[in-house]
Image (cartoon, rainbow, N blue to C red):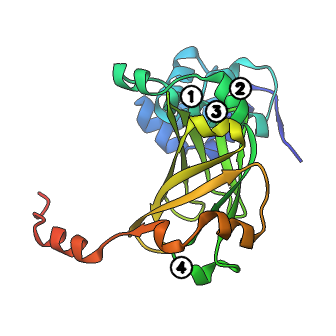
Amino acid sequence: MNQLLHTPAQKLDYLLEHYMSATEVTKAFGFKSNTMISNMRKGQTNIATLHMEGLEKHFGIPKEIFANQVCSAEEIDNLIENYKIIKTDEPNNKLSNNVFSNNEKLFQKLKGVWYGYLYPSNPASAKHGVWEVKTIIKDDYTVVDEPWGNRGYIQLGKHESLIIKESYDNDDLTIIRFSNRQVPSAHFRFVIISNQNNTLHEMVNFGFFSRKQYSPDEAKEILGDIESKQLKLDLAFNDRLNERAVVPQ
């Protein structure tokens, strides 16, 4: 059942239970004790604009949460998630502003469900020797895949775009790069940089996205030989590099 939160105190109580601790807020705000936070949780002290701005600055909690009269717990979670995406997308300098764009026409063609096909780093880990990853691009530019539930977001460039996802069971990043030109055809190739299963060893994988769902045999026919679609980290190269590493100070 989705919890309804009516007052600022109730909302703060939910935030303190799910996003940060009272001790963390006390330290960030420079309070001498948790008393001020306890009073705000009980509705005995107003949550001033200064406090809202502090929560936004230090913990990524948008002020909009307190501006709305009534919020559900789910709405609060969505507002916070969308705020993170917006902050990530904000240009920090002229370079990032020039690199990424707001191409609504392209995004309309990208939204929705895609089926991604690629070879796994360990062929035995996939039942038919090829992965099918159902990828959903949502209206807010977030991306989630099935069956694993990895989550991330999409960044649109002038000619190429990126999908950046974080693994569901660790902090590893997966970066998918593709050409915008191929998107309207409902089939487009991608190059993906990720770690090999259960390791920190990078690999480069070529695959393709399609609006159409293919059988494993059809997907492998399109992909071609696995040897031409993967490049794995040369461990000897890694060892030679480590031999020349300096001890961090």
Res. 32 in view: no
Residue type at numbered disc 2: Pro
In three-dimensional space, the C-alpha distance between marks 3 and 1, rounded to whole angstroms, equals 6 Å
Q: How busy is the neighbourhood of tag 1: few (under 14 within 10 Å), some, or many (20 plus)? A: few
Res. 72 in view: yes
Tell me the element at label 2: helix
In three-dimensional space, the C-alpha distance between marks 1 and 4, rounded to whole angstroms, equals 36 Å
Q: Are marks 3 and 1 in contact (CB under 8 Å)?
A: yes
Please identify the quarter of the rendering in which residue 179 is found: top right
Which residue lies most toward the bottom here?
124
Residue type at numbered disc 1: Ile
Identify residue for label 4.
122
Identify residue for label 1.
86
Disc ID at residue 82: 3
Q: Are marks 1 and 2 in contact (CB under 8 Å)?
A: no
Disc ID at residue 8: 2
Q: Earlier in the sequence, mark 4 or mark 2?
A: 2
Horizontal side, residue 45 vs residue 101: left or right: right
Observer-nearest residue: 181 or 142?
Answer: 181
Q: Earlier in the sequence, mark 4 or mark 3?
A: 3
In three-dimensional space, the C-alpha distance between marks 4 and 3, rounded to whole angstroms, equals 35 Å
Q: How busy is the neighbourhood of tag 4: few (under 14 within 10 Å), some, or many (20 plus)? A: few
Q: Are marks 4 and 3 in contact (CB under 8 Å)?
A: no
Please identify the quarter of the rendering in which residue 148 is found: bottom right
Give the number of the mark in front: 1 or 2. Answer: 1
Q: How busy is the neighbourhood of tag 3: few (under 14 within 10 Å), some, or many (20 plus)? A: some
In three-dimensional space, the C-alpha distance between marks 1 and 2, rounded to whole angstroms, equals 24 Å
Tell me the element at label 3: helix
> Percent position (x, y) of residue 218?
73, 67
Horizontal side, residue 94 vs residue 64: left or right: left
Residue type at numbered disc 4: Asn
